Image (spheres, helix red, strand yellow):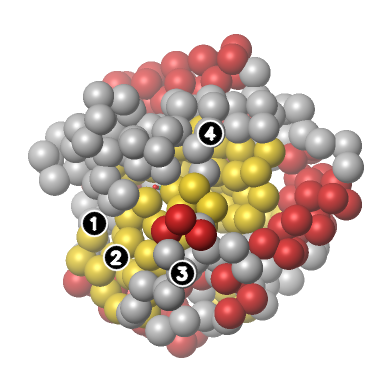
Amino acid sequence: MRLPNDIASVVRDYEQNGVVVLRRVLSDEQIAEIRSELNRYIAEDLPHKPADARTLESDGRTIRNLWRLQQHNAYFRQFAQQPELRQLVGPLVRGEPVLMGVETFNKPARVGSGVPYHQDNAYFCQTPPDVLTVWIAIDRVTPANGPVYYVLGSHRWGMLPTRQSRVRGNSIGLAEPPDVPKDEQLCATLEPGDMVIHHCQTIHHSEPNRTEHSRLGLLLVFRGAHTQTDPRLRSTYEEALATTPPA
Ligand SMILES: O=C(O)CCC(=O)C(=O)O
């Protein structure tokens, strides 16, 4: 990984905006290796995993998400533990980074579904909210194939009211979309190997992919070792999960 030397400026941007974009962190070779391991995992291992190791698109066969790769796959578990990444993540989560999840948002060509406006901490349920997601572009992300939009500074708005979304894989969203026009949000158009880091209270969403071009993202979730589960957030999330399970 080629991460910036100037960690202080990444921390400044992250604290200011709740999201920071880092370009060309992974090489083409590293991207090819990740893609090949994902394909191998899907073909050889996934059929033997529990159904909730993935979410399918509404066609019932195309993969929308892979979940908990840190449990299911040694390659991705190790990938997420690279020392230079932990060094960057530590100051952002204000403590010792603990890996909470490795997952994918595949946003496949033609059938890739949207993700409703949400704050991740409605899913992670941690207090204090020292949790973040590292979103790595495996495919190119264009304005057309379902980029993620982030509302800058919204990580400072606290946890907003939620409602169940009935979207498989994203069961809980914001009760109301934020009053910030899309053209004022950060649209994360990315090249393969670029990385976006966002805070777990940063509001974000993405639209369906109707193009012929897949928009695969690999996500790593870290919390600070000092965070704890908030029982109120957790029970709201469990209700949403019961209504709309991932599989
Ligand atoms: O990749 C997407 O479309 C949505 C990703 C997302 O919700 C997240 O990074 O938490």
Q: CA distance from mark 1 to mark 2?
A: 6 Å
Cα gap from disc 3 to disc 1, whole angstroms: 26 Å
**Amino acid type, residue under disc 3 in the picture:** Val
Amino acid at the residue labelled 2 = Ser
Provide residue 33's location: percent of width, then percent of height.
53, 16
The residue singled out by tag 4 in the image is 190
Give the alpha-carbon distance from disc 1 to disc 4, as whole Å: 25 Å
- Callout 2 environment at 10 Å: few (<14), some (14 to 19), or many (20+)? many
Instruction: Check residue 160 in the rendering and tell me which mark sits there, or answer none.
Output: none
Q: Quadrant of residue 136?
A: top right
Q: State the residue position of label 1.
A: 168
Q: Which residue occupies 76% across, 27% down? A: 2
Q: Mark 3 touching mark 2, by CB under 8 A? A: no
**Vertical placement of 54 versus 74: above or below?**
below
Of labels 1 and 4, earlier in sequence is 1
Which residue appears at 79% of the width and 50% of the height?
10
Closest to the camera, between mark 3 and mark 1, is 3
Work out how far the residue at label 3 is from the one at label 2, CA to CA, in angstroms.
23 Å
Image check: 119 left or right of 100? left
Q: Name the amino acid type tagged 1.
A: Arg
Residue at the extreme top: 29
| 237 or 75: nearer the viewer | 237
**Gap in Å between the C-alphas at discs 4 and 3?**
22 Å
Residue depth check, mark 1 versus mark 4: number of the one nearer the observer: 4
For residue 131, say whether it is visible: no
| Residue holding disc 3 | 180
